[in-house]
């Protein structure tokens, strides 16, 4: 890995985090709808947009794929998209933006620890300072996280459980996606994302009936318009643009550094949460943000290529 790829990968990881951070606010715009309905609407739209964008290259790309690739895309699409976003939305609605973003903030730790066992990866001992600071930062925010948005302890526990489930889902997706991108070098990261979008959209179509037809809730036209706009917005921004940047980062950076890039999602989610709540971060939250940023800097330093001295060359 050269210095150019390092900084390009970091820029792509930061861009992905900036876009992904918006999904933590989406459930707040659609509280009259269930997280399952929002997830289904988002991914049906994601599938439609992906199909339109990949249509000119569809036959050429499909000809290079085998059964293993399609099975991997189906599994990652279901676990990393539909199930993950349903659990994320449940966590936000039941436990709040801050709590959910904190739990998801442990993604860099889980992904980095798992990928540190890959062949050629940076030894885990070199990443310990970064992981420790990132963990402390997430704990600091959790201390400041407000109680359940409804004030009910049982509801808060459901939110926490959903957030932990989302953490597990996205950890599995991030690790699998990085490994598959290394295997399908003949497919661009953008087209790999669009293929995942087509598969995700197909799976989401199967969920339309149970999500909407059996719901007793009545919604006004304004509610539907806001719901459709939110679903389409996060489908385009997070699933198309955000995933494109993430796949680019996954190819530029080693897997142990890619995991740390997820901290940008936490940082931007916190920023958007503060803007949503119209407040400044507390002293503890400010310290947490500083710790998270320092964590990323230390991880980048551990992966920075060693300078080549003339006599060595």
Image (cartoon, helix red, strand yellow):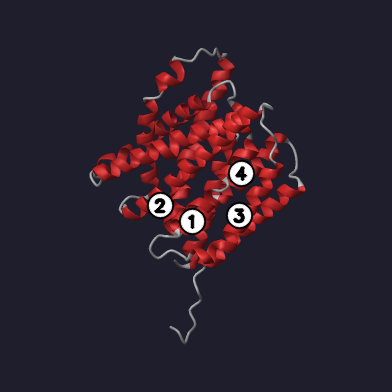
Whether label 2 touches label 1, CB < 8 Å:
no
**Of circles 1 and 3, which is in front?**
1
Q: Which of marks 1 and 4 is nearer the N terminus?
A: 4
Q: What element carries label 4?
A: helix
Q: Earlier in the sequence, mark 4 or mark 2?
A: 4
For the residues labelled 1 and 4, the Cα–Cα distance comes to 18 Å
Tell me residue 20's x, y (percent): 54, 42
Q: Is mark 2 on a helix, strand or loop?
A: helix
For the residues labelled 1 and 3, the Cα–Cα distance comes to 13 Å
Q: What element carries label 1?
A: helix
For the residues labelled 3 and 4, the Cα–Cα distance comes to 11 Å
The answer to whether residue 274 is left or right of residue 177 is: right
Q: Which residue is drawn at 65% across and 29% down?
A: 153
For the residues labelled 4 and 2, the Cα–Cα distance comes to 23 Å
**Of circles 2 and 1, which is in front?**
1
Q: Which of marks 2 and 1 is nearer the N terminus?
A: 1
What residue does disc 2 label? 178
For the residues labelled 3 and 2, the Cα–Cα distance comes to 21 Å
Tell me residue 4's x, y (percent): 49, 64
Residue 16 numbered tag: none
What residue does disc 4 label? 102
**Of circles 3 and 2, which is in front?**
3
The answer to whether residue 63 is left or right of residue 220 is: left
Q: Which of marks 3 and 2 is nearer the N terminus?
A: 3
């Amino acid at each position: 890995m050269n210095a150019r790829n390092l900084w390009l990968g970091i820029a792509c990881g930061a861009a992905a985090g900036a876009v992904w951070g918006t999904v933590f606010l989406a459930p707040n715009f659609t509280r009259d709808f269930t997280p399952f309905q929002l997830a289904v609407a988002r991914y049906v739209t994601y599938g439609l947009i992906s199909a339109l964008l990949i249509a000119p290259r569809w036959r050429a790309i499909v000809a290079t794929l085998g059964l293993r690739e399609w099975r991997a895309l189906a599994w990652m699409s279901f676990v990393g998209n539909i199930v993950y976003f349903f659990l994320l939305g449940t966590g936000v609605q039941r436990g709040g933006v801050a709590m959910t973003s904190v739990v998801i903030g442990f993604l860099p730790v889980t992904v980095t620890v798992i990928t540190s066992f890959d062949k050629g990866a940076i030894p885990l001992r070199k990443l310990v300072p970064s992981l420790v600071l990132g963990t402390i930062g997430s704990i600091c925010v959790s201390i400041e996280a407000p109680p359940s948005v409804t004030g009910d302890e049982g509801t808060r526990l459901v939110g926490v459980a959903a957030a932990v489930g989302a953490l597990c889902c996205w950890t599995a997706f991030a690790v699998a996606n990085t490994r598959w991108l290394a295997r399908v070098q003949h497919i661009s990261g953008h087209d790999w994302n669009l293929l995942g979008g087509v598969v995700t959209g197909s799976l989401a179509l199967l969920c339309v009936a149970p999500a909407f037809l059996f719901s007793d809730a009545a919604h006004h036209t304004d509610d539907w318009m806001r719901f459709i706009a939110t679903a389409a917005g996060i489908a385009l921004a997070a699933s198309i643009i955000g995933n494109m940047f993430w796949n680019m980062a996954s190819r530029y950076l080693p897997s142990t550094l890619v995991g740390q890039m997820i901290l940008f999602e936490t940082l931007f989610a916190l920023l958007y949460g503060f803007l949503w709540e119209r407040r400044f971060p507390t002293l503890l939250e400010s310290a947490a943000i500083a710790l998270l940023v320092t964590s990323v800097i230390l991880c980048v330093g551990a992966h920075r290529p060693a300078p080549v001295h003339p006599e060595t060359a």
